[in-house]
Image (cartoon, helix red, strand yellow):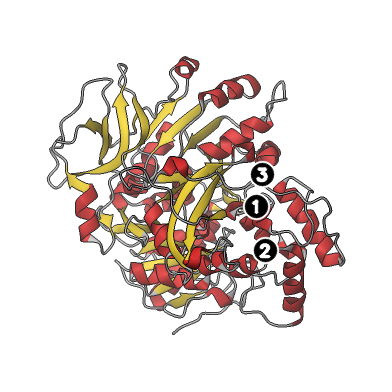
Amino acid sequence: MSIDHCVPRAVAHRAAEAAGAVAVELDGVGITYAELELRSAAAAEQLLSAGVRPGDVVGVLTGGGLDMVPALLGVLRTGAAYLPLDARHSRAQIAELLRLARSEFVIATSDVDDDLAPANATTVRPVWDGPTSQGSPVAVVAPEDLAYAIFTSGSTGEPKCVAVPHRALANHASAMSKRYSLGPADRVLQFANIGFDVAAEEIFPTLVSGGCVVLCPTPPPPEKLAEALDRAGVTVVNLPSGYWQRWVATLATADRVEVPALRLVVIGSEGVDPAAVTAWRRTVGLPLVNAYGLTETTITSMAYAVEDADLDGGVVPVGLPIDGVTAHVLDPEGRPVPVGVEGELHIGGACVALGYLHRPDLTAERFLPDPFSDVVGAVVHRTGDRARVRADGNVEVLGRLDDQFKVNGYRVEPAHVQSALSTHPLVVESVVRPRTGPGGTVRLVGYVVLRGGVLDVPSGLRSHLVDRLPVHLVPDVFVALPRMPVTANGKLDHAALPEPPAVQRRATVGAARTAVESRLLEIWREVLGSDEFGVHDNFFDVGGDSAKLLVVMSRLGEVNAHGVGLVALFEHPTIASLATRLTRSSSAPSSDRRPGATPRRRRVTR
């Protein structure tokens, strides 16, 4: 399927062909392709009226509800590029990302509270129920025009903003539609958070194929995934490998698991455990694709249908490039290495991004002239991944050439987190590393040396970081050390960093004293999968992490209509203190409410 180089125009064509088909659905409520076309056109018209022009970068601030997809398409229709912004982040973090992207406009969806609207940008609230209008036509864009910009962890101490052109987005949507055989009968789960580029893979290939995007703003715990997929009639799901492996572990005692509509599971973002593939074959047996790609190469650039024969080698391949993409394993001098020899993976072709927005220095380091292409100006991206080519031509990724790693599918550059830690007045030195906890969950651990050799971690360290980092980069556990361990050569000894202390279970736990505490206790038990804690225990000391905290935040509406924002959750990590905060917020306006509070439909301008 060819969609030229303009995804919103391809979606508009689908709307003309099947106006009454459901395009986007949330909890059984859907909008048709005709409604999607009208809403995205209306959003574009309102953005243009607010001053947005082709080439601008427009933040899309969303909690992942039904307004999200029309807002994304609305930005693209104007000829501007969208910058996804997670409404679960703090107002300060959102403002900082807008500053780095030099974005002066934000479109905020109806599930985002007005208090999150940044002061450094013009904010547009799309109105779908205003006077009937044909809206704005799709702008004419060139292949190299910017389609979206998205932040990823940076090795310089601040995030990098990857600039993805229409050429790359369109090639990806077309290639993935073909690779996954997507069509009008498909219902694809939108599992990834909007700030993670996989969200675009779940949305745009589905829409250009005429399928339905099934929104999932709050992914279920792995043990409840099969039920959720069955209830929504999902046919294709794309999951981080770590989450998928935890899902497989919950199926270990089952003889066979049936999800009738499901026909394809795509995994990626992390390495795959061959043992989990064996268990998958026994309990589910559905086709499984291992996908590989980077933000800089427009999400998935290689894919592999996992086979039983792959389970003996210890490494599940990432396969061959998708259409329009090239892959080369090269030595340090840029020469192809022989089959079976390790080198660095370089990705080229239509998928390669323009570089890092406003950072020509970083772009020059990673985006190099493509010596294998006949296209004038073609570049390859140095991935930093160690890889080798098998005899059958499939590629295996073996690890990193640097200290970058992934936690729950998110890229982590240690320097980015350590730079934020260094801004705390008590932190002298810091190191962050991934550690595998109970149940196979990977946690981000922050090791710190504090002034005066203090070994008690400051209580406000997490809340200090939440204004400076995306929530997935805030360490789940902190360990204070008198000094960092070093080798005989004076280098940091990563192997000598201690394991974080085990979760301490109290002999007696504090019982709930109020109705609010009782409901919070129930939510914690469901999210943490345990009941061995009380109202005075710290969420992070009893098995909680940043991802689970986001689930708790999404459910606070069950306790209080206003809820609280992410910063407040870090500041009130016990049930007792959070209950007090929620009780107070119900009787007085709060400047830190959660996304999803009742919005005031208005346009805010500077």
| Relative depth, front residue between 478 and 203 | 478
Q: Which mark is residue 573?
A: 2
Disc 1 + disc 3, Cβ < 8 Å: no
Element type where label 3 sits in the image? loop
Residue 185 in sight from this viewpoint: no
Task: Decide: is 27 above or below 572.
Answer: above
Residue 348 location (% of width, % of height): 24, 40
Q: Secondary structure at mark 1?
A: loop
Mark 2 in CB contact with mark 3 (< 8 angstroms): no
For label 3, the residue is 221
Direction from residue 249 to residue 184 in the image, left or right: left
- Residue 46 in sight here: yes
Q: Amino acid at mark 3?
A: Pro
- Whether the residues at callouts 1 and 2 have beta carbons within 8 Å, the answer is yes
Percent x, y for residue 47?
42, 72
Measured Cα–Cα span from mark 2 to mark 3: 21 Å
**Precedes in sequence: disc 2 or disc 3:** 3
Left-right relation of 4 to 122: left
Name the image quarter holding residue 128. bottom right
> Where's residue 490, x and y in %?
32, 48
Q: Please give the name of the residue rendered at 33% of the width and 40% of the height, measured from the top-left corner.
A: 2
Between the C-alphas of marks 1 and 2, the distance is 10 Å
Q: Nearer the viewer, residue 126 or 418?
A: 418
